Image (cartoon, rainbow, N blue to C red):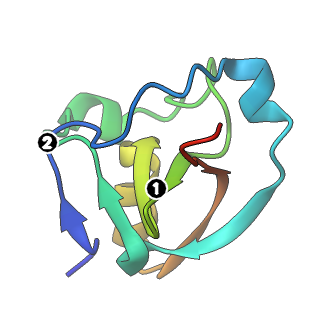
């Protein structure tokens, strides 16, 4: 199994982070097996595209909510890492709390 679980949507409220706020979060390694995806479908053309991260953040975005790591953005990069036999990737993790 690649991911901990596959979900359909985000179980947490909107955090309101934009690209600039995400860029302020330093990336850190996370095991793929710890991640819960928030998307159930994968576009094969995006998975195979060489320039898929050209316009986006190099690091996937993960939201830590209620002690679970949700892969909010970067599913294609995470699957690509798994296809390359990697067990972890560097991601930006935002710790979401009710007081945030």
Residue, x 65% and y 37% (percent of image)? 100
- Res 5 quadrant in image: bottom left
- The image position of residue 78, as x and y in percent, is 43, 57
Mark 1 Cα-neighbour bin, 10 Å: few <14, some 14–19, many ≥20:
some
Residue, x 77% and y 26% (percent of image)? 21
- Which residue of the protein is positioned furthest toward the front in this rendering? 99
Query: Counting residues from the N terminus, which is met first, the one under dot 2 or under dot 1?
Result: 2
Identify the image quadrant of the N terminus. bottom left
- Residue at mark 1: 65
Residue nearest the observer in this picture, 42 or 73: 73
* Figure disc tally: 2
- The image position of residue 14, as x and y in percent, is 44, 25
Residue nearest the observer in this picture, 100 or 86: 100
Residue, x 41% and y 80% (percent of image)? 85
Mark 2 Cα-neighbour bin, 10 Å: few <14, some 14–19, many ≥20:
few
Residues under numbered marks 2 and 1 in contact, where contact means CB atoms less than 8 Å apart = no
Q: Nearer the viewer, mark 2 or mark 1?
A: 1
Q: Is residue 36 left or right of residue 90?
A: left
Q: CA distance from mark 2 to mark 1?
A: 15 Å
99 vs 28: above or below:
above
**Which numbered disc covers residue 42?**
none
17 vs 59: above or below:
above
Residue nearest the observer in this picture, 26 or 47: 26
Q: Secondary structure at mark 1?
A: strand
14 vs 44: above or below:
above
Q: Secondary structure at mark 2?
A: loop
Q: Is residue 42 left or right of residue 72?
A: left
Q: Is residue 59 left or right of residue 37?
A: right
Residue, x 21% and y 36% (percent of image)? 9
**Which numbered disc covers residue 8?**
2
- The image position of residue 94, as x and y in percent, is 64, 48
């Amino acid at each position: 199994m690649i991911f901990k679980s596959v979900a359909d949507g985000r179980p947490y409220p909107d955090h309101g982070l934009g690209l600039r706020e995400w860029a302020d979060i330093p990336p850190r390694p996370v095991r793929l097996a710890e991640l819960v995806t928030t998307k159930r479908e994968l576009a094969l053309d995006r998975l195979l595209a060489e320039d898929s991260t050209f316009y986006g953040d190099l690091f996937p975005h993960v939201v830590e909510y209620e002690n679970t790591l949700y892969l909010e953005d970067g599913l294609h990069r995470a699957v690509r890492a798994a296809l390359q036999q990697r067990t972890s990737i560097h991601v930006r993790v935002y710790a979401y709390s009710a007081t945030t």
